[in-house]
Image (cartoon, rainbow, N blue to C red):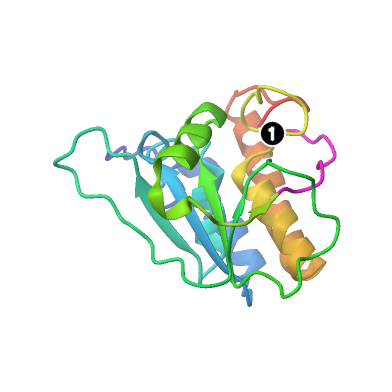
Amino acid sequence: MDDPARCPRCLYRRELCLCPALAAEGPIVTRTRVVILRHHTEKHRSSNSGRLAHLALPHSELHDVSAPDRDTPVSVPVLGEGAWLVFPDGPPWTVSPAPPPRTLVFLDATWQQARRMRQRLPYLRGLPMLHLTPVPAAERLRNAPQAGMVSTIEAIATALRLVESDAVAEPLERLFAVAVDHARRAGRRSSAATG
């Protein structure tokens, strides 16, 4: 998808490019490995917050999954020991598991797609779940099907705050606020009830 009016890195219109905000925050280094499993339909959406998180986290991994045809290769991550799936299932965690996760896995998709990915991807079966406590309502890029459901970058920030510190969560939250502001300036609506 080549559009000369858009930044090829962040996919925002060039006059609203998010790359300066990414540079201002600097690389956000975590001790926890972050693996983002992105549904193939999210790849070219400027509202995809998983891409923004991946650009900010130099040691993160972004894997496109659920290709539309069987001939398109998909990336399969090797998750290893200590991997946890961040997903709203089971009781919410208010303190970090002990020992803390080595790897946090995030499903970057619509909520309906994320539920299907969780069921269909064999390497997710058996992973312990990290259900996050609700995040306060904020302006977001897309509508969420119900309260408490958040964007991928917000989930990553919240999980990293739980298992690491505010120091890695806050830059991600600032980047997301810039993305929402730039989307609003581009004429897209945002509200506290979106994800």
Residue at 86% x, 56% y is 94
Asked if one can make out residue 17 in the rendered structure from this viewpoint, the answer is no
Q: Circle 1 sits on which residue? A: 140
Look at 60% across and 23% down and name the residue there. Answer: 187
Residue 177 in the image: state x and y as whole percent. Answer: 71, 45
Left or right, residue 44 beside residue 96: left
| Residue extending furthest toward the front | 126
Which residue type does callout 1 highlight?
Answer: Arg
Q: Is residue 137 magenta?
A: yes
Question: Considering depth in this image, is 124 or 169 the residue closer to the camera?
Answer: 124
The image shows residue 71 at horizontal and vertical percentages of: 13, 41
Q: Up-down: is 11 above or below 77?
A: above
Name the side, left or right, on which 73 lies relative to 14: left
The answer to whether residue 62 is left or right of residue 194 is left
For the N terminus, which image quadrant? top left
Please provide percent x and percent y for residue 134. 81, 41
Image: magenta residue range: 131-139
Count of residue discs: 1
Position in image of residue 35 (x %, y %): 50, 60
Task: Please say whether residue 86 is visible from this viewpoint.
Answer: yes
Residue 108 or 103: which is nearer the viewer?
103
